């Protein structure tokens, strides 16, 4: 190996040694630094996450305090009493009679972080005042929820019946807050209440009444539609109301339901297209109920046939008699 090759070999070895040394130095010196930087980045992310959670916690705590300030109390019994008082006051503010409303306690129902309590309410009143009540409850600042709302026609004319559940929460545990007697921003005199007047003016709960047909002026109807002379009453208009005797003579009392009057007929008189032959007082089985007896009937002669009408029936209920069913007086003188 000549001197030139030796110098090249020495230079190459030195370069390799220098590169290897740099890797050794980097692994010994810079790797811990890089690891520290990585750990610092992770720590910063954790700190940022903790700060976010902390801010969210304080925001949620502030929001929870605002909600707690709208609750009625921290204890179930106190909240039930206070909510009932507010509910009764709202009914009175809606110009409704408190005596017309029933309030039944509901709950408590255990939930995560709270207990649900409330009242089942039912009452009657004018539709205008019921709308007042629902409007005031909807605008009430107290923490509550209306559930199962039902409005139907009431028992008295002009009134409706409302049913609903008035529910609220009792927080557990509850943050320490100072409660005040809350008042709604809107009242019955607010313009927002006037937006509901359409419910009252349209009277949506009134039972449907079919519109009567419009009367046609005389001479304006289609040809052939003009009413003709009134038809004579049919046999269903005549009812046998009594088959009594007066001074030994049978009488037939017939009620004319079309003319709203009662007339007295005797044997030989004509009525409803026939002639009264006689009054039959034989006890016979009732035509509709053979197990019962019928004690009187009038017998009509129409042409050559005889027809019987029981007391209390109309002439439309007449039945044809066979020769075997005729009384002896008619059987001898057909």
Image (cartoon, grey):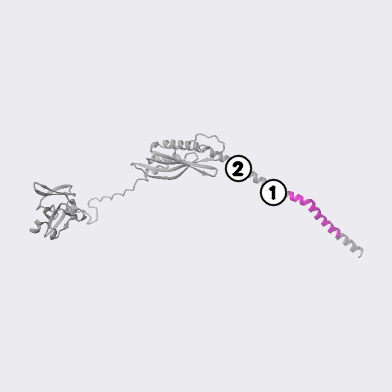
The mark nearer the N terminus, 1 or 2, is 1
- Total labels drawn: 2
Q: Does the magenta segment cover residue 129?
A: no
Q: Does the magenta segment cover residue 16?
A: yes
Looking at the image, can residue 333 be seen? Answer: no
SS at circle 2: helix
Q: In this view, does 132 lie above or below 299?
A: above
Looking at the image, can residue 115 be seen? Answer: yes
Q: Are marks 1 and 2 in contact (CB under 8 Å)?
A: no
Q: Which residue is drawn at 78% across and 51% down?
A: 30
Q: Is residue 308 above or below residue 176?
A: below
Q: In which quarter of the image is the C terminus?
A: bottom left
Q: How crowded is mark 1: few (under 14 residues within 10 Å), some or many (20 or more)?
A: few
Label 1 – label 2 distance at C-alpha? 22 Å
Foreground residue among 283 and 249: 283
Which residue is at the far bottom?
1
Q: Position of residue 17 (x, y in %)?
A: 84, 57
Q: Which residue is drawn at 51% across and 43% down?
A: 110
Which residues are the magenta region? 13-36
Residue at which label 2 appears: 57
Q: Residue at x 65, y 46 (%)?
A: 49
Foreground residue among 197 and 315: 315
């Amino acid at each position: 190996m000549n001197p030139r090759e030796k110098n090249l070999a020495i230079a190459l070895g030195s370069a390799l040694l220098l590169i290897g040394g740099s890797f050794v130095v980097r692994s010994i010196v810079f790797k811990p630094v890089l690891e520290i930087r990585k750990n610092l980045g992770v720590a910063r992310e954790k700190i940022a996450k903790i700060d976010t959670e902390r801010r969210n916690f304080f925001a949620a705590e502030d929001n929870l305090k605002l909600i707690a300030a709208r609750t009625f109390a921290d204890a179930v019994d106190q909240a039930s009493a206070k909510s009932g008082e507010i509910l009764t006051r709202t009914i009175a503010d809606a110009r409704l009679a408190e005596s017309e409303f029933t309030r039944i306690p509901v709950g408590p129902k255990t939930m995560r972080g709270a207990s649900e309590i409330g009242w089942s309410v039912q009452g009657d009143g004018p539709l205008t005042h019921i709308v007042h009540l629902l409007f005031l409850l909807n605008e009430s600042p107290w923490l509550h929820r209306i559930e199962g709302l039902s409005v139907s026609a009431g028992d008295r004319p002009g009134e409706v019946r409302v049913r609903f559940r008035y529910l609220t929460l009792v927080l557990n545990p509850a943050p320490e807050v100072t409660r005040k007697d809350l008042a709604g921003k809107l009242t019955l005199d607010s313009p927002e209440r006037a937006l509901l007047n359409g419910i009252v003016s349209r009277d949506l709960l009134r039972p449907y009444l079919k519109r009567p047909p419009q009367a046609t002026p005389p001479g304006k109807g289609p040809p052939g539609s003009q009413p003709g002379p009134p038809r004579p009453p049919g046999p269903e208009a005549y009812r046998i109301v009594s088959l009594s005797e007066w001074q030994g003579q049978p009488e037939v009392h017939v009620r004319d339901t079309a003319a709203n009057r009662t007339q007295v007929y005797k044997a030989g008189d004509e009525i409803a297209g026939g002639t009264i032959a006689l009054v039959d007082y034989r006890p016979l089985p009732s035509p509709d109920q053979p197990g019962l007896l019928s004690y009187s009937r009038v017998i009509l002669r129409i042409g050559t046939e005889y027809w019987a009408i029981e007391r209390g029936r109309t002439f439309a209920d007449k039945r044809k008699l066979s020769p075997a069913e005729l009384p002896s007086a008619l059987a001898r003188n057909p």
